Amino acid sequence: MMDSMRASTLLSVDEYLRTSYRPDCEYLDGVLVERNLGEYDHSRLQMKLADYLYAREKEWGIRVVPEQRVQVKRRRFRVPDLSVLKADTPVEQIFTQPPFLCVEILSPDDRRSEMQGRIDDYLTFGVPFVWLLDPRTRRAWIYTAAGVQEVKDGMLRTVDPAIEVPLAELFD
């Protein structure tokens, strides 16, 4: 479905950056790409995870930011559902340094190959952790440069800082 949402004309980076989109779009090598969102399961899970992380920002030394543009390459901008920064990371209006964690929540129209492209962009950019959550199946995966691991013990995790989020808190 996302292929059908691509713009037919190429945009410059400057044009993308000075235009507001509602909801925000990704920019991939001159092509504007709409994001799949707006359904209850997706929105609810995003809010619950953001709330859980936000409540522990001081404890874990992090900052949580929803739907923030991340410039993963010179001509590629992704918009993860959530980005988590270490607290001492400088504030940027558009992230040009890798967040500590990017979170993507699957929507019914998301295709696995396109989601893998996003994840690859984050990891190549230097994001240490990427979480992928599926609200329909209640499954989750943790991606790192070392590979992917499905969450089988019910706990989303990172290290340095150590973040632990029980899936049961999100999928109630």
Image (cartoon, grey):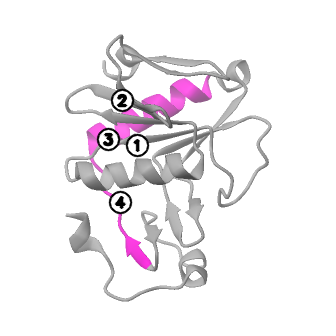
Q: Which residue is mark 3?
A: 42
The structure residue drawn at horizontal position 20% and vertical position 33%, both measured from the top left corner, is: 136
The residue mark sitting in front, 3 or 1, is: 1
* Residue type for callout 1: Glu
User: Which residue is at a point 19% across and 64% down the rendered structure image?
Assistant: 1
Q: In the drawing, does residue 89 fall left or right of residue 158?
A: right
Proximity of marks 4 and 2: CB atoms separated by less than 8 Å: no
Quickly name the residue at label 4.
Answer: 35
How far apart are the two marked residues, 1 and 2, measured between alpha carbons? Answer: 10 Å
Which of the two discs, 2 and 3, sits closer to the camera? 2
Residue at (65%, 61%) from the top-left corner? 94
Specify few, some or many for label 4: CA neighbours under 10 Å numbering under 14, 14-19, or 20 or more.
Answer: some
Contact flag, marks 1 and 2 (Cβ < 8 Å):
no
Q: CA distance from mark 4 to mark 2?
A: 20 Å
Cα separation between marks 2 and 3: 16 Å
Q: Is the residue 165 above or below the residue 80 in the image?
A: above
| Residue 36, image quadrant | bottom left
Question: In this rendering, does residue 28 appear at all?
Answer: yes
- Give the residues drawn in magenta, as a range: 31-55
Residue identifier under label 1: 104
Q: Is residue 18 above or below residue 70?
A: below
Residue at far bottom of view: 9
